[in-house]
Image (cartoon, rainbow, N blue to C red):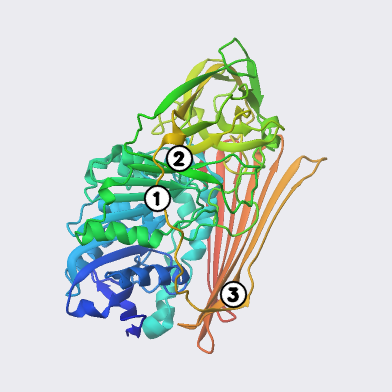
């Protein structure tokens, strides 16, 4: 089934990998013709996102480039997805990881492989690459992880600071839609419809699963490589973006791994660094080849001499939710934590940040706070994905401002806020933002952290607050690399809610703040620091498509002044297009409607509708629809999902899911 490739590369869209239980996974393989007589290392990317249509455009240039540089490159769909047999169960399940280990061992045993395998991936593939590395399959000699995490509970799309983020239900809706499509009939044959119906019938109710584990229990510990960093023995290159939802992994890995490790944090969105929607992008493809050459081929490419931690220090700019380029400069640290970074302390006062002085400030939950939060995952799908000007949210928060700084200052690392707080209710939460206030009063986002105060002693357990009792708590903000210009001020803004980024408590509460400090990691000599050089992305061969319907995006927010109801609506028609190589026609669209009453946290509600289709002209046409609803009451969350599927115009499957979960 091989197809001719480019410059001596053959492409097989459906190489079968037999697992020990009889299930066969499907791989798309880019193979240099010379591998038949001269075995070479292999690169694996292992994902659920449907290689034949879901990631085909992205995959082609990347895996072709690896093959052109002397690697067999494989893009494998995980069990129950795309053309791979079996059933999908959950993200990063034991079955998924065990399959991944088997795949690596299978690759290493093939006559075209010299026994050395690397694994790479972004997001899901970045997660499972680290998790598989922790299982230490012998042929795995190098890892590249991008946009991933070391802690599935504390630093993923489900919970942050012990608070359920809005994207938890958003991801439950998206994933049910993603995995509702059949395999390509041209590759699997006449059984495709039977396989599809079997998948639909066994669709997991992941929203229920994830909400049912509101603490950091064994469910989240599984797959969290921070449980035992020493288990990872292969060298790791970790990359990620400061405009992504995953900002912390690079520093965590460089600080904790015992195997060779390098971290690179750029200004990027949730994309591979060569195709980021926020620039400057870099030449990831040759950066990766350099890493592979060094660890898989034994060619000294000098990667061991690179800085341990390279960070793009972002300049202060006028806030722009649609920003496409962030000015700044790179700094490279030979060690991390770096001896060039020293903590500076700013004490809270009566609205001030600097010298400690007595104060007593109360905050109440105004559910309009969060308008400028931006998206958890900026993908470049539409307008307004990044944090916007913060003054609106600042006005609904307790703010502490520093004096204007007398010289440019560079923050490099994770800020921390220690605060003395009391609540008038047993359940409460706190959102802490760090902002850059320009001389004209404009407030720009630097970093933030969240804390469910019932998790004040650890995320593995909850404990109600004693109303009126003082508690000393610490909130660690996300890693940042940020230049604060001379004349600008720092602002710490503390609020009781941040909708729709995270779900509010079921009852309103007041917080009383009476002491605190901000601990900032300040680079002592950033302008004299080593400046790594990264090349711009190279031109690549793009996969050919015919656009049948253009993509469109819209975002509207309305606040009814009479009722106080706030409605945020996001619509995304991702278009319809035909792959001119395999003939597959794919389309999808999504609508999210988030609603809340400004003074009633128990009114929070969201509806998410996904439509998805797959077809080939004159052969087949299928589609699915997933409607997801979630709302909160004082003591419970409620979730409903409805999955429907059509073969042509015939409804062939319908299933309803619903549950209520205690808060």
Say whether residue 419 is visible. no
Q: For the residue labelled by badge 2, is the local secondary structure a helix, a strand or a loop?
A: loop
Q: Is 419 or 328 nearer to us in this picture? A: 328
User: In front of the other: label 1 or label 2?
Assistant: 1
Q: Residues within 10 Å of mark 2 (few under 14, many from 20)?
A: many
Q: For the residue labelled by badge 3, is the local secondary structure a helix, a strand or a loop?
A: strand
Q: Residue at x 51, y 34 (%)?
A: 449
User: In front of the other: label 3 or label 2?
Assistant: 3
- Across and down, in percent, residue 123 comes to 42, 54
- Across and down, in percent, residue 299 comes to 21, 59
Q: Which mark is residue 576?
A: 3
Residue, disc 2: 214
Residue, disc 1: 239
Vertical order, 636 against 339 (above or below):
below
Q: Residue at x 47, y 76 (%)?
A: 543
Residue farthest front in this picture: 528
Cα distance, mark 3 to mark 1?
A: 31 Å
Q: Quadrant of residue 512?
A: top right
Seen in the image, is 573 located left or right of residue 414? right
- Across and down, in percent, residue 237 comes to 32, 51
Mark 1 vs 2: CB contact within 8 A? no
Q: Residues within 10 Å of mark 3 (few under 14, many from 20)?
A: some
């Amino acid at each position: 089934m091989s197809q001719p490739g480019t410059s001596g590369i053959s492409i097989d869209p459906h190489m079968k990998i037999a697992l020990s239980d009889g299930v066969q996974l499907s791989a798309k393989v880019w193979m240099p013709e010379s591998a038949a007589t001269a075995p070479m290392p292999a690169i694996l990317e292992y994902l659920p996102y449907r290689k034949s249509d879901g990631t085909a455009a992205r995959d082609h240039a990347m895996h072709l480039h690896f093959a052109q540089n002397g690697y067999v490159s494989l893009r494998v769909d995980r069990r129950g997805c795309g053309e791979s047999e079996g059933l999908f169960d959950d993200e990063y399940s034991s079955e998924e990881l065990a399959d991944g280990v088997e795949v690596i061992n299978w690759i290493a045993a093939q006559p075209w492989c010299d026994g050395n395998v690397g694994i790479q991936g972004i997001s899901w593939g970045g997660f499972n690459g680290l998790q598989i590395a922790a299982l230490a399959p012998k042929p795995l000699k190098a890892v590249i992880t991008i946009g991933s995490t070391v802690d599935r509970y504390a630093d993923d799309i489900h919970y942050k600071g012990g608070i359920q983020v809005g994207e938890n239900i958003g991801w439950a809706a998206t994933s049910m839609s993603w995995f509702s499509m059949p395999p390509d009939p041209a590759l699997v044959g006449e059984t495709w419809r039977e396989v599809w119906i079997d998948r639909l019938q066994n669709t997991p109710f992941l929203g229920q699963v994830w909400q049912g584990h509101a603490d950091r229990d064994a469910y989240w510990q599984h797959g969290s490589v921070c449980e035992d960093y020493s288990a990872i023995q292969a060298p790791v290159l970790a990359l990620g973006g400061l405009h992504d939802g995953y900002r912390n992994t690079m520093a965590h890995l460089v600080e904790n791994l015992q195997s060779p490790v390098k971290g690179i944090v750029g200004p990027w969105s949730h994309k591979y660094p060569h195709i980021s929607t926020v620039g400057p992008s870099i030449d990831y493809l040759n950066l990766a080849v350099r890493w592979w050459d060094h660890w898989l081929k034994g060619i000294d490419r000098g990667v061991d001499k690179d800085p341990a931690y390279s960070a793009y220090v972002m300049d202060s700019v006028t806030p722009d939710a649609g920003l496409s380029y962030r000015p700044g400069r790179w700094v490279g640290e030979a060690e991390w934590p770096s001896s060039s970074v020293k903590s500076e302390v700013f004490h809270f006062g009566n609205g001030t940040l600097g010298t400690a002085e007595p104060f007593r400030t109360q905050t109440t939950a105004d559910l309009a706070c969060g308008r400028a939060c931006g998206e958890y995952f900026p993908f470049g799908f539409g307008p307004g994905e990044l944090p916007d000007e913060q003054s609106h949210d600042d006005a609904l928060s307790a703010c502490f401002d520093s004096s204007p700084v007398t010289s440019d200052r560079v923050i490099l690392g994770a800020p921390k806020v220690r605060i003395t707080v009391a609540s008038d209710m047993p359940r409460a939460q706190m959102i802490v933002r760090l902002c850059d206030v320009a001389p004209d009063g404009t407030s720009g986002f630097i970093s933030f952290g969240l804390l469910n105060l019932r998790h004040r002693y650890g995320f593995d357990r909850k404990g109600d607050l004693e109303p009126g009792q003082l508690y000393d708590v610490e909130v660690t903000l996300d890693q940042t690399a940020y230049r604060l210009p001379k004349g600008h001020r720092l602002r710490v803004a503390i609020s009781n809610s941040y909708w729709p980024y995270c779900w509010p408590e079921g009852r309103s509460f007041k917080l009383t703040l009476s002491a605190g400090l901000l601990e900032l990691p300040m680079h002592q000599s950033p302008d004299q620091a080593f400046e790594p050089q990264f090349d711009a992305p190279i031109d690549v061969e793009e996969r050919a498509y015919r656009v049948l319907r253009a993509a469109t995006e819209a975002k509207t927010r309305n606040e009814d002044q009479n009722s106080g109801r706030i409605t945020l609506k996001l619509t995304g028609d991702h278009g319809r297009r035909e792959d001119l190589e395999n003939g597959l026609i794919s389309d999808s669209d999504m609508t999210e409607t988030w609603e809340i009453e400004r003074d009633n946290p128990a009114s929070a509600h969201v509806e998410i509708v996904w439509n998805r289709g797959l077809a080939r002209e004159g052969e087949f046409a299928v589609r699915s629809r997933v409607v997801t609803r979630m709302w909160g009451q004082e003591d419970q969350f409620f979730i409903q999902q409805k999955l429907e599927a059509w073969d042509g115009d015939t409804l062939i499957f319908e299933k309803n899911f619903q549950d209520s979960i205690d808060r």
